[in-house]
């Protein structure tokens, strides 16, 4: 037997074995769950949602559902995952500027269905075989929403078969109201000083609800913007005529409603 040939084979085998790449083992623990960043978010710190019953134009609607996106990582679940949520007082957040300070903490059972309620038990599930799913938040149309905007702030916690990723940072806040509210992209140059009565007038005299999306659509279209400014000016003249001795249309503090441009 040629021993030099055998030695050569052993040396070649050791070279090939040493070149084999060692891959990490397959993850076998519970899947991690987290809330993905909301639109235009700069971090995963807060995912924001807004809901305003005022724009439904139907007083018989006394509840609604906000669907919150949820993502899994580390493993695609082979079984349905129980989603465990925990509400908290967002006044205690480490970055309070990320929360609208002109709102109040919502109350379970009054402004939304509590996560511990039987109605929510079968709904707080991340379904097997998915990498992204949604969970529902059922909000309630309490009369207090006509006076104040409330916020529901919550985070994930570990459940019996899922792990909450990034426990200290990953949050969701849902704002709910039943009243007119100023869109975040209100443009005073074109529409003048904001007022709740003015906003209500704009809704009544158009086919828009003038939320953030409607406002941006109009601001991005010069023709549409000019049309609505002219329409509101003319409609306001007509409404003031109809008001007679109660004219002109005013805000609650007495400010006269107008659509004159604001010059700085």
Image (cartoon, rainbow, N blue to C red):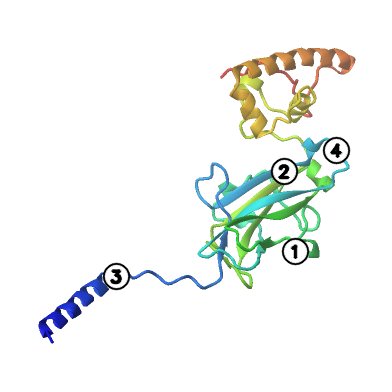
Residue for badge 1: 122
Q: Is residue 75 above or below residue 212?
A: below
Counting other residues with Cα less than 10 Å from the Cα at mark 3, is it few (<14), some (14-19), or many (20 or more)? few
Label 4 SS = loop
Pointer 1 and pointer 2: residues touching (CB < 8 Å)?
Answer: no
Q: Nearer the viewer, mark 3 or mark 2?
A: 3
Q: Is residue 9 above or below residue 260?
A: below
Q: Earlier in the sequence, mark 1 or mark 4?
A: 4
Image side of residue 70 versus residue 197, left or right: left
- Horizontal and vertical percent for residue 222? 60, 17
Which quadrant of the rendered structure holds the C terminus? top right
In the foreground, 183 or 224: 224
Q: CA distance from mark 1 to mark 3?
A: 47 Å
In the foreground, 253 or 27: 27
Image side of residue 261 versus residue 231, left or right: left
Residue for badge 4: 58
Q: CA distance from mark 2 to mark 4?
A: 14 Å
Counting other residues with Cα less than 10 Å from the Cα at mark 4, is it few (<14), some (14-19), or many (20 or more)? few
């Amino acid at each position: 037997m040629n021993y030099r040939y055998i030695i050569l084979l052993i040396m070649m085998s050791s070279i090939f074995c040493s070149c084999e790449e060692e891959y990490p083992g397959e993850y076998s623990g519970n899947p991690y769950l987290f809330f993905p960043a909301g639109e235009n978010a700069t971090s995963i710190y807060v995912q924001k949602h807004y809901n305003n019953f005022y724009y439904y134009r139907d007083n018989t609607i006394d509840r609604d559902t906000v669907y919150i996106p949820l993502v899994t990582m580390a493993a695609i679940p082979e079984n349905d995952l129980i989603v465990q949520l925990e509400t908290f007082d967002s006044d205690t957040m480490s970055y309070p500027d990320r929360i609208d300070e002109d709102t109040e903490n919502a109350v379970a059972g009054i402004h939304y269905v509590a996560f511990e309620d039987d109605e929510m038990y079968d709904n707080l599930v991340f379904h097997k075989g998915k990498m992204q799913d949604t969970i529902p938040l059922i909000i309630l149309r309490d009369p207090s929403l006509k006076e104040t905007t409330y916020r529901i702030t919550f985070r994930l916690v570990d459940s019996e078969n899922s792990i909450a990723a990034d426990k200290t940072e990953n949050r969701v806040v849902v704002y709910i109201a039943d009243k007119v509210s100023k869109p975040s992209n209100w443009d005073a140059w074109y529409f003048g000083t904001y007022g709740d009565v003015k906003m209500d007038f704009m809704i009544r005299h158009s086919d828009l609800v003038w939320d953030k999306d409607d406002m941006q659509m109009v601001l991005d279209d010069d023709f549409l913007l000019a049309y609505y400014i002219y329409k509101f000016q003319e409609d306001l003249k007509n409404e003031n005529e109809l008001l007679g001795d109660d004219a002109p249309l005013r805000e609650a503090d007495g400010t006269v409603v107008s659509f004159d441009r604001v010059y700085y």
